[in-house]
Image (tube, grey):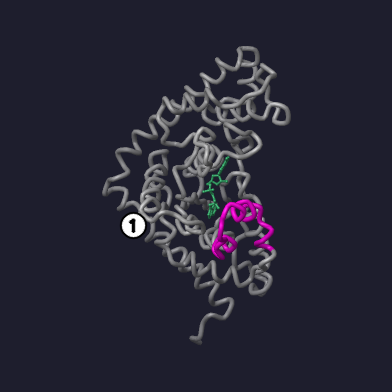
Amino acid sequence: KPTIFSGVQPSGIPTIGNYIGAMKGFVDLQDDYETTYCIVNQHAITVYQDPKTLSQTTRLLAALYIAMGLDPQKSTIFIQSDVPAHAQAAWIVLCQTGVGELERMTQYKDKAQKQEVVSAGLLAYPALMVADIILYDAQYIPVGEDQKQHLELTRNFVDRFNNRYGNGKDLLVKPEPMIPKSGGRILSLQDPTSKMSKSDANTKAFISMLDEPKTIIKKIKSAVTDSVGEVNYDKENQPAISNLLDIYSALSNRSIDDLVNEYHSLGYGKFKSDVADQVVATFEPIQQKYHQLVNSQELTDILVEGAKTANETATRTLSRMEKAIGLTYKP
Ligand code: TYM
């Protein structure tokens, strides 16, 4: 089976943007691929996290993974800091990555702007992501559009490493991003020029996967629209309406064309109310399962088991890398 790896940061409650852009795909891939999904808590600490909150959101995200349909019998689910090979491999990646390459990353530039003091970890962040991916020989990486540049960096690293150390063999697997055709970039409900983000200061800009039905309805009702008055899929001229169409389409599995046909002339009020109903219908059952799981021993057991499996694979790849670059001494 082809291999899949992906991760989400426990830096807050994931949004429906995280779900549509990446997490929903995690579930769909379980049957036909060898899937490994991580909660990347070491990525989260590249900016300050309140310790207690971080440990809670780590568990929260793990519970959401399972509540939305990941099956620990089919997928390896684990916490990044449970597998030391990630940080070890990241060091090797860092030593072979230019500072300039890292400084060019747009996510770094965006995030650095918002920090009073920029940690070296924030700059190094993509190297840790490279490590995550290569340790599992991952071929396909389900992510949203904003991760494309990090994937490109990963591909360049793999080429460089294989060329330098492979003696004609591919020591590491070159991954490809898997980005959904629509929904790869879900926009803020308040400002359709920026992406929906779980750390947005304006909570009306995003819907979290744990928002209550009445909050979801309120947020969609107050989402900005435009003065056109007709539902069209036109990202240029009607970005806010197109965004609601992306959300509706992804969650209902109905095509954009189909939705535009139905809602074109029905008015924004009716359209928004049906989008809201769909969002509630998708997340209510997930939330119910989430609440049953989040404090359970079962969840802890799943993560301990996941870490065991992940450690085996990751340690094996790390040794391969160490051997290739000479971090060995035994004959
Ligand atoms: P993170 O935690 O910011 O987001 C998790 C996933 O959600 C996607 N995403 C979106 N998709 C559509 N619309 C949006 N508004 C939106 N916002 C976020 C992201 O593209 C991502 O797929 N660096 C990664 C985490 C990571 C990772 C990895 C991913 C660490 N190591 C290895 C894949 C493989 C990140 O910050 O995602």
Q: Is residue 130 left or right of residue 159?
A: left
Amino acid found under the numbered disc labelled 1: Val
Q: Nearer the viewer, residue 299 or 118?
A: 118
Q: Nearer the viewer, residue 9 or 51?
A: 51
Q: Position of residue 20 (x, y in %)?
A: 54, 37
Q: Is residue 252 above or below residue 16?
A: above
| Label 1, residues with CA under 10 Å away: few <14, some 14-19, many ≥20 | some
- Disc 1 is placed on an element classified as helix
Is residue 48 one of those drawn in magenta? no
Q: Farthest residue toward the top?
A: 266
Q: Is residue 244 above or below residue 117?
A: above
Query: Which residue is painted at 69% across and 65% down in the image?
Result: 100
Q: Is residue 147 left or right of residue 305?
A: right
The magenta stretch spans which residues?
101-124
Q: Position of residue 52 (x, y in %)?
A: 35, 53
Q: Is residue 160 above or below residue 243?
A: below
Q: Is residue 25 visible?
A: no
Q: Position of residue 210 (x, y in %)?
A: 41, 36
Q: Nearer the viewer, residue 13 or 131?
A: 13
Disc 1 marks which residue?
Answer: 304
Is residue 110 one of those drawn in magenta? yes
Query: Which residue is painted at 44% across and 54% down in the image?
Result: 49
